[in-house]
Image: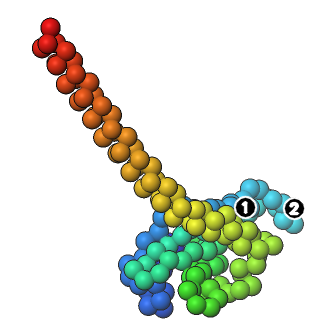
Amino acid sequence: MAMRRLNTSAGILEVMGAPLTGTELRAYVMSGGGLTLKNFKPSVRGKRCFLIFPIRGSERKGLVSVEVKNKKGQYDMKLLAVDIPMASGPDQQLFLIGDEEEYRVGGGLISELRDPVVKAMAASKEFDDLDQIEEEKDAERELQDAERKHHEEIEKLEKGGSQ
């Protein structure tokens, strides 16, 4: 639902570049739901979901913040915002739905979720670099093992032939 809204937003696409893609990395918190008594009548409370995930366009990367409330089986999006890190100056924050006030709901729950996701995004580049180094070392080690086995086979053949 959020990706559909983002991919049809001219403003977001202009800043980030089309097409927009999400990632497997997500952080979310569910709240609410369950039965409650209101004026001595039982009722069902709506559930809220606070969700954060990285997004990538052809020009820039960003971090999407979403708040959705489930009301009687229908999803009501309260917040849809994208934080875009800028090379020069402060990060840019674009709101498609909601505003800065909605961003602070639940004691700033979205910003609490945001910090570990930002760290994970930064770490993923470091992990990619480490994976590349490890792959190169593994390939070198495999080559050395193959050369050593080849030399051992040659020595066996030479010893076998000289007797």
Q: Residue 158 location, x and y as percent?
A: 16, 19
Residue that extends furthest to the right in the rendered view of this protein: 40
Q: Quadrant of residue 162?
A: top left
**Mark 1 closeness class: few <14, some 14–19, many ≥20 residues within 10 Å:** few
**Horizontal side, residue 137 vs residue 33: left or right:** left
Image quadrant containing the C terminus = top left
Image: 100 above or below 113: below
Kindly tell me whether residue 97 is visible in this rendering. Answer: no
Image: 32 above or below 84: above
What numbered label is drawn on residue 20? Answer: none
Where disc 2 sits, the SS reads loop
Image: 161 above or below 85: above
Amino acid of disc 1: Ser
* Residue placed under numbered mark 1 in the picture: 31
Q: Quadrant of residue 133?
A: bottom left
In front: label 1 or label 2: 1
Where disc 1 sits, the SS reads strand
Task: Depth check: give the residue in front, 111 or 38.
Answer: 111
Q: Distance of mark 1 from mark 2, alpha carbons?
A: 23 Å
Amino acid of disc 2: Phe
Report the residue at 64% width, 72% height from top: 67
Report the residue at 24% width, 29% height from top: 151
Q: Residue 14 location, x and y as percent?
A: 44, 91
Report the residue at 42% width, 55% height from top: 132
Q: Residue 127 location, x and y as percent?
A: 52, 57
Residue that extends furthest to the top in the rendered view of this protein: 163
Q: Residue 39 location, x and y as percent?
A: 87, 66
Task: Depth check: give the residue in front, 123 or 154.
Answer: 154
Report the residue at 19% width, 15% height from top: 159
* Residue placed under numbered mark 2 in the picture: 40
